[in-house]
Image (spheres, rainbow, N blue to C red):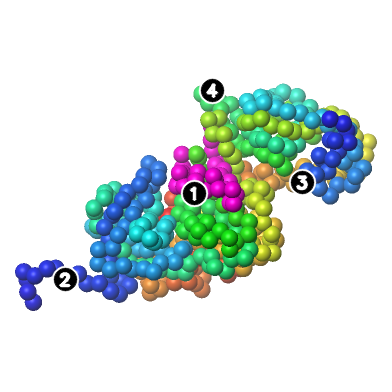
Amino acid sequence: MSTEGIRDLLAAHPFFDGLPETDIDLIAGCGINVHLSGGQILFEEGAPADTFYVVRRGRVAIEMHAPQSTIVLATHRSGDVVGWSWLFPPHRWAFDARAVEDTSAIALDGACLRAKCEDDTDLGYRLMKRFARLATDHLAATRLQLLDVYGTPGSTAS
Amino acid sequence: MNDTGPTRVLVGGPMVPARHRVAGVFREMADTMTLALEPLDSDLGPYVAGQFNMLWAFGHGEVPVSISRLPADGRPLLHTIRAVGLATSALCSLREGDVVGLRGPFGTGWAVDRAKGGDVVVVAGGLGLAPLRPVVLAVLADRASFGEVAVLIGARSPDALVYHDEILSWRQRLDVDVQVTVDNAGQDWSGDVGVVTRLLDRARFDPGGTTAFVCGPEIMMRFAAAGLLERQIPASAVQVSIERNMKCAVAHCGHCQLGPTLVCRDGAVYPYDVIGPLLAARGL
């Protein structure tokens, strides 16, 4: 897919909604279109975080493996962005990510985009604000998940 | 008085339980049952979606339980009950043919009719789907009267989903967007994992013309309401059903008081512009 094609896909994606066209152009230059088969691993815990994914179709699970099992922490679908460890040192993934089903995404080269953000700090700031919002949304959701609200019976039956 | 005559059952008054026969028992989860109930003494209806009854397990106690299906067309009244204490455990142990006492119906209901002509978003968490089920059934039964319909369901884990088969049948319809997410799952679950509020991003609705119906654990409802308000749905168009310690159910005992309101009388369904500030107040 051409850079123009990537550009159009990014411009239509809610995560990039409202960014200046020049930003979209710069970001698109770091992206390629990818198709992932169900079960395919996107990245693994501890590995260098050099790519992140803008999900177009399908579903991706963020997972943590334990000796006896693998726990799914969250899933991401169309409209979601998977991964922000590429943005922060030490640039290593904290979790695993796996395509739950056949998935289409735009893979963005984190090192490429970091370099562009260093060169163009306005782009960097705008992008950082979006990833900060993404991270705080996920933090709030994770806190709610940790509360295990369904596991605490109320005073009444239903 | 004729001691040898048939026992006269006192019927009437909101404090007098009317006997109901258990016409069916359906296991939803290990600790959760749905009871189908048929009146023996008198029919307490008509019922409104969102109301609750006081269910009396004889010898054990009485608890408030939401109506999870209204009786209609020969189908019995349904209540879904989770065994969390003495009375609820006794209710969950009932078998077909057993008898329970019912008082009710009590409380306000979901304003489903007010949602007509607009979009509908139902947000259910855990057993919160039980009181919302009559809303979903009413909307689906009169589907042409509503715009976009989204039913967003959250549960603790895949095996904690109630009404599993019914949810599947809703998902097979093309005119309703049913999304399910769980908080915890293994790799054998191919659906969504994450809190139910995350599904709001994926639901289609016109905020200015949407009515939202929300029920679940109170923390989940606060987050869901915040998410709906953030998406520009007015607080007055967000209805929530809350739980408090309903005892008498007729606004006398005060156990269910929440600030200036008695939940058994003024709730359990409230518009969020009324109840939201009370839910946000510490210590209430």
Q: Are marks 4 and 1 on the same chain?
A: no
Residue that mark 1 sits on? B126
- Asked if residue B184 lies in the magenta stretch, the reply is yes
Residue that mark 2 sits on? B8
Q: Which residues are magenta?
A: B159-186
* Front of the two marks 4 and 2: 2
Checking the image for residue A14, the label placed there is 3
Callout 4 crowding tier (Cα within 10 Å): few <14, some 14–19, many ≥20: few
Q: Are marks 3 and 2 on the same chain?
A: no
- Can see residue B231? yes
* Mark 4–mark 1 CB contact (< 8 Å): no
Chain where mark 1 sits: B
Residue that mark 4 sits on? A67
Question: Residue shown at 60%/55% (left/top)?
Answer: B149
* Front of the two marks 1 and 3: 3
- Asked if residue B160 lies in the magenta stretch, the reply is yes
